[in-house]
Amino acid sequence: MEKTIRFQDNWNKKLCCNYFTTLRLHNPVKYKAGNQHKLLLQEAGIWRDYGMVEVVSVRVVRMHQLNEFICGLDFGASIDDSKDILFKMYREKVPDINKAEFALVLYKKLKSQPSQSSIFQ
């Protein structure tokens, strides 16, 4: 089974960049440097394939460690708004959101081979 990373929202338009971050519940098997995932974004109720991405680096953080820098880059939101988003996303998945470990994951998009490259050789 192919591993995927799903986004229901393109926070801060970050998925348009070659490198982007995401804050997810810590999963050391899934979020490990070198792992590749298919990037899926939900648009109008449909999961669209946006290609392959690779985990570059992972930092484990807890709620109390979130700061304006992380929240601004990842969510495009304030610390309080970002914490509210995380609470809504994970309230039913962890017993205490304030004790949960999160993975701040840095991804890079993988480039596919250009289809026209053979024309110019």
Image (spheres, grey):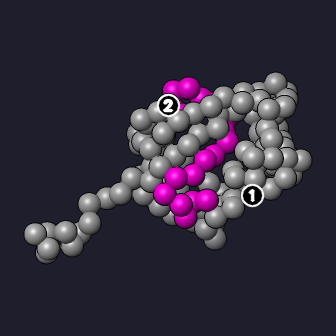
Where does label 1 land, which residue?
A: 76
**Can you name the residue that lies furthest to the left here?**
121
What is the span of residues highlighted in magenta in the rendered image?
14-31
Decide if residue 6 is in sight here: no
Residue at the image position 56 percent from the left and 43 percent from the top: 106
Closer to the eye: label 1 or 2: 1
- Of labels 1 and 2, earlier in sequence is 2
Q: Which amino acid does the dot numbered 1 rest on?
A: Gly
Q: Quadrant of the C terminus?
A: bottom left
Where does label 2 land, which residue?
A: 32
Vertical position of residue 98 compared to residue 76: above or below? above
Residue at the image position 69 percent from the left and 52 percent from the top: 73
Residue 109 x %, y %: 45, 53
Residue 15 forms part of the magenta stretch: yes
Q: Which amino acid does the dot numbered 2 rest on?
A: Lys
For label 1, the crowd category at 10 Å Cα-Cα, with few meaning under 14, some 14 to 19 and many 20 or more, is some
Dot 2 falls on a residue whose secondary structure is loop
Residue at the image position 64 percent from the left and 64 percent from the top: 13
Q: CA distance from mark 1 to mark 2?
A: 24 Å
**Viewer-proximal residue, 73 or 39?**
73
Dot 1 falls on a residue whose secondary structure is loop
Residue 92 x %, y %: 80, 36
Image quarter of residue 91: top right
